[in-house]
Image (cartoon, rainbow, N blue to C red):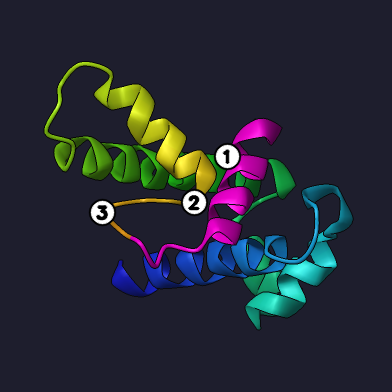
């Protein structure tokens, strides 16, 4: 089971890495497969089609975003407006909880969430 999850994460990481330099509509399935290091058959073993990949990307992106928001909110001592400030810091790439979290990676997550 762990190996299966690792391969799925490998594919999802590949898409995120591609999104650091390209818009989502500029990325082909063949490019994703090539970037992931899997064969076409290997890719389709984990995802039946591009829609399944997009669903998995969206779910993972939502979890990452939710975790980042919660981390930011937990570090904010003022409860009034905490959620909005956390969102603003994430959008501006000025996080408290994870200052090294790449703004480009947040942009990639944003592209995925806008696609869904």
In the structure shown, which secondary structural element does the residue marked by tag 2 occupy? loop
Left or right, 104 with reference to 86:
right
- Magenta extent: 99-116
Furthest residue toward top = 80
What separation in Å lies between label 3 and label 2 (alpha carbons)? 11 Å
Residue under the point 69% across and 41% down: 51
* Residue 52 percent location from the top left of the image: 62, 44
* Residue 110 percent location from the top left of the image: 60, 41
**Which circle marks residue 93 in the picture?**
2
Q: Which residue is mark 3?
A: 97
Identify which residue, 31 or 7, lies in the foreground.
31
In the structure shown, which secondary structural element does the residue marked by tag 3 occupy? loop
* Residue 67 percent location from the top left of the image: 29, 44
Give the mark, 1 or 2, whose residue is nearer the N terminus.
Answer: 1
Q: Residues within 10 Å of mark 1 (few under 14, many from 20)?
A: some
What separation in Å lies between label 1 and label 2 (alpha carbons)? 25 Å
Q: Residues within 10 Å of mark 2 (few under 14, many from 20)?
A: some
Q: Which residue is mark 1?
A: 55
| Residue 99, quarter of the rendered image | bottom left
Report the magenta stretch's main SS.
Answer: helix
* Residue 57 percent location from the top left of the image: 55, 48
Closest to the camera, between mark 1 and mark 2, is 2
């Amino acid at each position: 089971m762990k190996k299966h999850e690792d391969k799925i994460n490998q594919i999802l990481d590949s898409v995120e890495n591609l999104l650091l330099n390209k818009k989502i509509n500029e990325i082909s399935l063949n490019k994703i497969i090539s970037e992931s290091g899997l064969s076409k058959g290997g890719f389709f073993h984990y995802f039946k089609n591009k829609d399944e990949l997009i669903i998995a990307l969206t779910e993972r992106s939502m979890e990452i975003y939710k975790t980042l928001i919660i981390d930011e909110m937990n570090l904010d001592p003022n409860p009034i407006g905490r959620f909005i400030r956390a969102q603003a810091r994430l959008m501006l790439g000025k996080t408290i909880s994870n200052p090294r979290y790449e703004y480009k990676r947040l942009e990639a997550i944003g592209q995925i969430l806008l696609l869904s």
